[in-house]
Image (tube, rainbow, N blue to C red):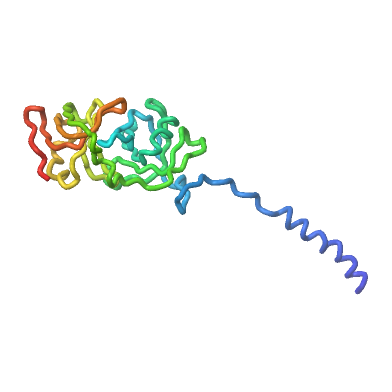
Amino acid sequence: MRRRAALLAPAALLLPRRAAAQAPAALPERPRGEFWFDPTQLPSFTGTVERYLPNPRGETDALIFREGPQIVFPPDIADAVRHVAPPGRPLVAWGIRARGAPVITMLAFAPAGDATPTVVDRFYWRLGGRQPRDQAKDLSVSGTIKQPYYTPQGEVAGAILEDGSVVVVPQAAAEGVRDLLRAGAKLAAEGTGVEGEAGRALLATALGDSPGTLKPIPR
């Protein structure tokens, strides 16, 4: 019995070493942010940046892919997104696509699928970003509509003209002027907003299919 115990002792001493050798490798560090989940588990959308879009406050909070979809993000990360993907360059965006429109709320982004993504630290719903600042000026624009301008939820909120000008309509009036905001239609608008290197964006007070047919937007 003593001989058997002695023979088993060395084998018992080896057990901790085998357990240590079989310990699982550490998981790679995931991108960090304020979310309780990893945004890069969401669907990814890849496209070429055509242009960045200002809002009537003069902030940049969206871009258009050359392939069509609009990508929405908080204004304070616009410089970081533009650095990663200037116009004409590809961008990978992880996020949530609206059910009924080609608009994506971006929660992470990278220049390529194999690059380390940057995680956006919050959702951005554009709840107040469209209202002009006190120093906004009167503007007028006209041209052909490239595509409707969408809220993150996919509702039509205005129009993007072929030259990149952004026309936003008051939320309460959007449904009543929806027929004027179709892709390919002619649109003229007056309102208040900003004009600069980033482009033109206004909150419309009057719309029409030409400057001579402008009518005030019911509020």
Q: Where is residue 128 in the image (x, y as percent from the top left)?
A: 27, 45
Quarter of the figure with residue 86: top left
Residue 54, placed above or below residue 104 = above
Query: Residue at image x 43%, y 46%?
Result: 121
Residue 184, placed above or below residue 23 = above
Residue 182, placed above or below residue 28 = above
- Pick out the residue farthest to the bottom: 1
Q: How many labels does the image show?
A: 0
Taking 218 as reference, is 149 left or right? right
Quarter of the figure with residue 144: top left
Taking 199 as reference, is 29 left or right? right
Instruction: Please tell me which residue lies in front, 186 or 19.
Output: 186
Instruction: Please tell me which residue lies in front, 80 or 11.
Output: 80
Instruction: Please tell me which residue lies in front, 23 or 157.
Output: 157
Query: Residue at image x 10%, y 28%?
Result: 210
Query: Residue at image x 7%, y 36%?
Result: 215
Quarter of the figure with residue 157: top left
Q: Quadrant of the N terminus?
A: bottom right
Q: Position of residue 67 (x, y in %)?
A: 33, 32
- Pick out the residue farthest to the right: 3
Q: Position of residue 123 (x, y in %)?
A: 37, 47
Q: In which quarter of the image is the C terminus?
A: top left
Q: Where is residue 216 in the image (x, y as percent from the top left)?
A: 9, 38
Residue 49, placed above or below residue 35 = above
Taking 69 as reference, is 217 left or right? left
